[in-house]
Image (cartoon, helix red, strand yellow):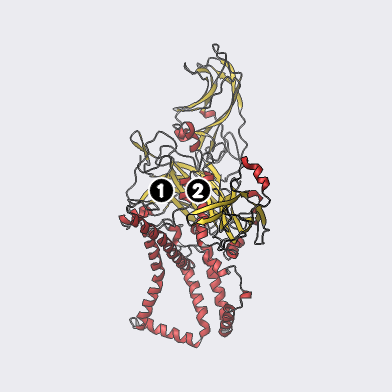
Amino acid sequence: MNSRATSNPQDDFKIKDTKPQLGEQWPHRGVRGGGGWISSDRVTSTYDLVEQMYFLYVRVVKARDLPTNPVTGSCDPYVEVKLGNYKGKTQHFEKKTNPEWNQVFAFSKEKIQSSVLEVFVRDREIVARDDYLGKVVFDMDEVPTRVPPDSPLAPQWYRLEDSRAEGRVKGEVMLAVWMGTQADEAFPEAWHSDAASVHGEGVFSVRSKVYVSPKLWYLRVNVIEAQDVESQDKSQLPQVFVKAHVGNQILETKLCPTQTTNPFWNEDLIFVVAEPFEEQLVLTVENKVSPSKDELVGKVSLPLHIFEKRLDHRPVHSRWFDLEKFGFGVLEGDRRKELKFSTKIHLRACLEGCYHVLDESTMYISDQRPTARQLWKKPIGILEVGILSAQWLLPMKTKDGRGRTDAYCVARYGQKWVRTRTVVESFSPKWNEQYTWEVYDPCTVITLGVFDNCHLGGYEKPAGNAPGRDLRIGKVRVRLSTLETDRIYTHSYPLIVLQPNGVKKMGELQIAFRFTCLSLTHMIYLYGRPLLPKMHYLHPFTVRQLDSLRYQAMNIVGSRLGRAEPPLRKEVVEYMLDVDTHMWSMRRSKANFFRIISIFSGIISMSKWLGDVCQWKNPITTILVHVLFCILICYPELILPTVFLYMFLIGLWNYRSRPRHPPHMDTKLSWAEAVHPDELDEEFDTFPTSKSQDVVRMRYDRLKSVAGSIQTVVGDMATQGERFHALLSWRDPRATSIFIVFCLCVAVILYVTPFKILTLSTGLYLQRHPRFRSKMPSAPINFFRRLPARADSML
């Protein structure tokens, strides 16, 4: 039943504290193995962030010496496992008396309604009813309990009994039956009774899986020059350009400004490629015959594995490649031999291993490591996430006139994606699956999304949903730097989505997570390091290049993960990677504007306070300010120590009111509650627009493109201001600790250092010679860029 307790609508969008029963709670006096079939002295477990779920596991390995049909003389066996009203079947083999299945069935203990487990072996018949070959019966009270990490339970041979249990029949079946939890290694690949209604190919799409993003590289192709370029019209010199293809990525050089047979460009073309390298780099030299006509001069296809993998900024050796003349195909091979000269192209190409290939926004970045594994540093922590359950989910589709939801959860951090199993036909699914990630930088974000599985068959497609697309239910983002180390967080997050008719809560997601620090010194050291690898600063890309490369990287990740089994579909990957955040939105622009206003609210309040002091509205306060001003004028060396000491004291004072919960989607901050319907219609409009009239379409598209850039700039300005607030707000406890300790040290240093010497040193440092400057950002800038902003809470 999909019911929900009545509550304040504002509280409906807030994070709620939960107290789930985490950890392994085994029967027999609450201690695992205590008095049970298997005893163990280990009391803790790596599966301590989820609620314990018990399953009856049945592993059907194989059978032997099965009797044949007296009529056909053959046997097409399969096994049926029955527990109460639940039945699971293996595949059948044709004409095989010694079949091997090696399949595992998992029955949820909560739904067990029988005291007997029956395993039937049957002979498949096409026309008549399947023949009964024998069965094995297990008493549920005698089923042993297995506690990981103990070794798997060894299967045994069991003689088949007849239907009335009056005697033995010919044949044996090898089985293993045990009671376990979701920590069992057989859990991910098992057939689950929760999905007993799913058949066919839909069975593969309900299993939990771990995915790894493809290894992405930037392919840099420096097109230097070409030689001996000939036009089909011998009377005119060619004016050419180079077009490069890698998969569906197409880039062009500029048109050579002069007409010559030896054109020169020296331009860089950047592509995104993924291992294993399946595409080739295809270069074509084309002659600009007229403004509307290009003439193909030559072509060359180069496999990507021939290019050098560069791990630093050292130059790469250039190479000449012969172009295949256009028009000489396989059937004209003899004419190729007549050519004494061939057009050549001069390239300097390499695979950049010292960049991080961005496939997500830097605001919610989850990985900052370069492509080359040789350049990776050691992890500084471990992130453990327990995906517990969801509650009060709304029906996403219909079956037989009734609403249904088949929910699964996807989590993405770094290169690792995880997908829970699909719980069929439930508005309150319980997953209780735990996953672990290595953390290389604390200033990163983990993203969790809940989706409705639309690939199980038998459902009516909801209105507006394209066929075969999994539906979004909601998303949660958690920034690791806002977490205290070695603390278990258990919260219920509202799943909020923005729809054409307004903001809507789709349910709640209950998760538990813990961030464990392996090296506090290394983590503090990272706060002064650049956010991205150094090549992003020594040889940076343009903003336009980064946007294009990110879009191509997202397409490659979606394509590769969509080829897994079960596939992680493109619409899921796009939603998790926030592919459409750069598009124009009046609502989001308003939200960014009011974020800036809230940043300057402190300055406005201070100016009002100074105005009140000058107006003597509070005489006592005005007298104290005058006294303080006179003291600072007489002793100017106390100004900076007082300021930093004041910030140190403010930081300590704010520690009492520090945030207790990680930040989450804020509907008020996102301006989602008061948005105008017409603005939502504009936000959900397609790009290019689907509105009528050609002129309106042209202006509308231009407005969205220009406004999208403005919106990004405004959002960046708001982010910088919010990072100033984060210095003393304890939103990032480590950053605030570092800053207030720094303020105390600076206050002491400034107190003992003469003010004139400090002023002189500062002036000389700011005016130092460029030789003494570095292209890398300084430690204070790196520290500031790592501070959290409220962008994490934006819808």
Give me the C-alpha separation between circle 1 and circle 2: 15 Å
Pinpoint residue 701: horizontal percent, then vertical percent: 39, 57
As rendered, which of 544 and 170 lies closer to the eye? Answer: 544
Of all residues, the one furthest to the bottom in this rendering is 634
Q: Which residue is drawn at 66% across and 50% down?
A: 306
Point out the tag, 1 or 2, that comes first from the N-terminus: 2
Of residue 333 and residue 672, the one placed in the foreground of this image is 333
Which quadrant does the N terminus fall into?
A: top left
Residue 122: x %, y % from top left:
52, 20
Is residue 486 visible to us here?
A: no
Q: Name the residue under label 2.
A: 411
Disc 2 packing (10 Å; few <14; some 14–19; many ≥20): many
Q: Name the residue under label 1.
A: 508
Q: Residue 664 carries which label?
A: none
Callout 1 amino acid: Glu
Quarter-wise, where is residue 233 in the image?
bottom right
